[in-house]
Amino acid sequence: MGLEPGYARLAREGDLADRIERARSLAASCRICPRACGVDRTAGERGYCGAGAAPTVYSHMSHPGEEPPITGNRGSGTIFFSYCTMSCVYCQNYRFSQLHEGRDRSTDELAEMMIELAARGCHNVNLVSPTHFLLPILEALAVAAGRGPAVPLVWNTSGYESPETLSVLDGVVDVYLADLRYTDPTAAERYSDAPDYVGVAREALLEMNRQVGVLETDAAGVAVRGLIVRHLVLPDGRSGTPEALRFIAERLGPDTRVGLMAQYYPAYRATEYPEIARGISRSEWDRARAALTEAGLTHGWVQDYRGGDVSPIAGSKLEADLPPGGDSTAGGSPGSGDGG
């Protein structure tokens, strides 16, 4: 028998109800994300993110393009939520994160999506940009627990998380799939309207690492627990790649699993910002890859220059993390974490 997912254990032990009440308190005077708008989300009031009380879902699917230990050979059971706590001008998922396409769902409907994805054989339930729907997600997990296969829960996040929310999630989330986007507060403010992002995300990553630690996989190389940190390389050095990778190595540890992403392109409003109104150059990508070596990070995956297939970092010891069959690439981009 594999490792029991955290939410399933909390539900079985009767502790998930306490997490729901703590989330309800955060939502009633909204402090779910670092913006701390103070609106009553339980009454449908809308703050910075624009989301109401009901979870708004754009789509749910078996996703084949995450990092190999998330995708495995049966796909990641991905739920894409609408709205977002950030306002990234280059967001590749802008249709639902910024333009709010999607459909409001009930808690029971969200639970059925989770159950369906697990029943399809997906290796996990992967929640993309979930933070602003913390309360209904926990309520849905309480409904879904014990109904169908119990699979790990992946919290697929921008990294812009409050300590209070992470405290609620402690023991609920099995795998954090988190971004580290910037090292310069000016860039974070200009491109994501989040001048406090750098400090917030670093503290959030430290807490995620404390909760789940280094990535653990099962005998098939599929993630059951742990942290993966993604870093999207932006043009003109705007993502601060060398400093970001040094932070990961020095503060989270050199064994941290890293996904280095080349998939940036000027989506949404990026063309309004001349310095990021293009894809990254080959030399920029080569420098980013060299920064991995300089930081001493050899555990993880890199995209090819065009943002397609992923392969282990050169010298990686992660062959066991690849899908059965030992293929060194996984089709598609390494993530639904869109950089926005």
Image (cartoon, grey):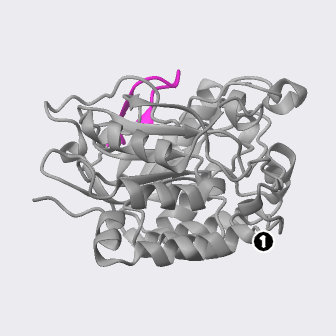
User: Residue 105: which quarter of the image?
Assistant: top right
**Amino acid on which the number 1 mark rests in the picture:** Ser
Q: Is residue 184 magenta?
A: no
> Which percent across, then down, holds residue 8?
31, 64
- Which residue is at the front of the view, 134 or 270? 134
Count of numbered badges drawn on the protein: 1
- Which residue is at the front of the view, 222 or 188? 222
Q: What residue is disc 1 on?
A: 29
Q: Residue at x 42, y 63 (%)?
A: 173
User: Quadrant location of the N terminus?
Assistant: bottom left
Locate residue 26 relative to residue 76 in the image: left or right. right
> Which percent across, then down, holds residue 210?
44, 76
- Image: magenta residue range: 302-314
Q: Main secondary structure of the magenta part?
A: loop
Q: Is residue 198 above or below residue 310?
A: below
- Which residue is at the front of the view, 313 or 132? 132
Locate residue 308 relative to residue 174 in the image: left or right. right
Q: Residues within 10 Å of mark 1 (few under 14, many from 20)?
A: some
